[in-house]
Image (tube, rainbow, N blue to C red):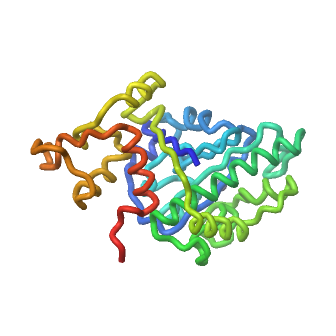
Amino acid sequence: MKLIQSFLTQNPCYTAGRKIKVKGLMLHSIGCPQPSASVFVKSWNRADYDRACVHAFIDGNTGDVYQTLPWDHRGWHAGGTANNTYIGIEMCEPACIKYTGGATFTCSDPSAAKAAVARTYNAAVELFAMLCKQYGLDPLKDGVIVSHKEGCARGIASNHGDPEHLWNQLGIEYTMNGFRAAVKMAMEKGIVTTSETTGTSSSSTSPEKVKEEGEMRYNRISEMPGYAQSTIIKMVDAGIISGGGAAKDENNRPADLNLSIEMIRVFVTNDRAGLYDKKP
Ligand SMILES: [Zn+2]
């Protein structure tokens, strides 16, 4: 799974800055024929876009995950109380479907649609497995992983049928029970995640900058990409990494860590998999 951090810093939900204690994960499907996650990232990253905000979009063309809010940020995805405790993830939908009213659609290219839906489903399994590990959640426990549709049935989300409406009408045998079981299996198998930061986030904005980062060494935690700082702090404080000399930063942590961006990314991936957490 490729995880691309691109926070919607202009969206009023981001600037509201409310945090949640994550108790569950809600799976959505966007409800319009647009497979490109970056289209949503662009159009939702506006101060006047006050209708919705989610934690991530999954791209229908690539399966890449665009993280658009910090995971513990309160999102606007459920249209109900689930916003107070659930992370909300949107899967993008194939370009070849056409909504004809409500959640009903026709499809001009069923095999292309099925391939796109399989990409988003498989990436969602990996993402949900990563998040279950990160937040200590059991995917099979009642109410931990729900679809928007199931959230509605539970009285914690608005009246939507996603994502089951998409799977059912395309004749794909995905179900939420099958999804939860697949997440459980992915947790046992382990997930390989690569991370990058793009677009609206402050630490890098263009391909040139990414290339430059590849050769750059980071000595101080405050210079490192925002998504990595808590991981590096954790590792320094646990004595897993240290600087070569006596130089200290403003927080009395080493100021000569000498880490490449590749090393930082591996550390963050490992951290998300729980490798640096103390054993209970
Ligand atoms: Zn939804």
Tally of numbered discs: 0
Q: Is residue 100 left or right of residue 234?
A: right
Q: Say if 253 sits above or below 204 in the image.
A: below
Q: Quadrant of ligand 1?
A: bottom right
Above or below 22: residue 105: above
Residue 237 or 259: which is nearer the viewer? 259
Identify the residue at the far left of this view.
246
x 39%, y 48%: residue: 16
Q: Residue at x 42, y 63 (%)?
A: 274
Residue placed at 67% from the left, 66% from the top? 182
In x, y percent, where is residue 17? Answer: 37, 50
Q: Residue at position x 23%, y 38% from top?
A: 219
Residue 260 figure quarter: top left
Query: Where's residue 149, x and y in %?
Result: 70, 63
Residue 110 position in % (x across, y down): 88, 45
Q: Give the answer, above or below, for where 28 lies relative to 179.
A: above
In depth, the one of 164 and 132 nearer the eye is 132
Q: Quadrant of the C terminus?
A: bottom left
Is residue 188 found left or right of 244 in the rendered image? right
* Residue sitting farthest toward the top: 208
Left or right of 204, for residue 148? right
Q: Quadrant of residue 14?
A: top left
Left or right? Give the position of 58 relative to 31.
left
Measuring from the top left, give residue 29's x and y in whole percent: 69, 51
